[in-house]
Image: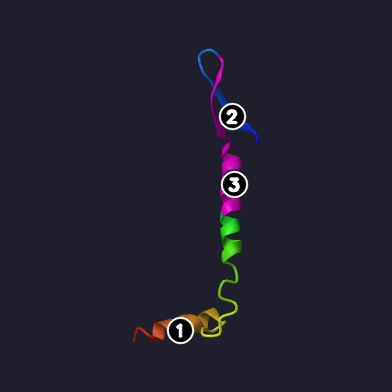
Amino acid sequence: MNQIVREGATGEPVEAVQRPEEALAQARARRLAALKAAEGMWKDRTDIPLDGVKAQEQLRAEWH
């Protein structure tokens, strides 16, 4: 990992901070992993329509 290290007054490393592009890449990787885990969550359900538009229409019909 390519980190930015800040030094104290005597030259010792005080903290290590990730570069912004690395932090962004890690955040994207976490988000993608979460999306992949949720992908297909409802694919085997038979009580809801597979078509998203039909599912929305069914939900909205309950409001009337």
- Secondary structure under tag 2 reads strand
The image shows residue 42 at horizontal and vertical percentages of 56, 75
Residue underneath mark 1: 57
- Secondary structure under tag 3 reads helix
* Nearer to us in this view, 17 or 64: 17
For marks 2 and 3, the one nearer the N-term is 2
- The part of the chain drawn in magenta is 11-30
- Name the residue type under label 3: Gln
Quarter of the image for residue 57 reads bottom left
The image shows residue 26 at horizontal and vertical percentages of 59, 46
Which-is-in-front pick, marks 1 and 3? 3
| Quadrant housing the N terminus | top right
For marks 1 and 3, the one nearer the N-term is 3
Q: Which residue shows up at 53% across the image and 12% down it?
A: 10
Q: Is residue 33 magenta?
A: no
Q: Is residue 22 magenta?
A: yes
Q: Residues within 10 Å of mark 1 (few under 14, many from 20)?
A: few
Quarter of the image for residue 4 reads top right
Q: Residues within 10 Å of mark 3 (few under 14, many from 20)?
A: few
Q: Which residue shows up at 65% across the image and 34% down it?
A: 2
- Name the residue type under label 2: Ile
The image shows residue 36 at horizontal and vertical percentages of 61, 62
Measured in 3D between alpha carbons, the distance from the residue under mark 2 to the one under mark 3, in whole angstroms, is: 16 Å
Measured in 3D between alpha carbons, the distance from the residue under mark 1 to the one under mark 3, in whole angstroms, is: 37 Å
Residue underneath mark 2: 4
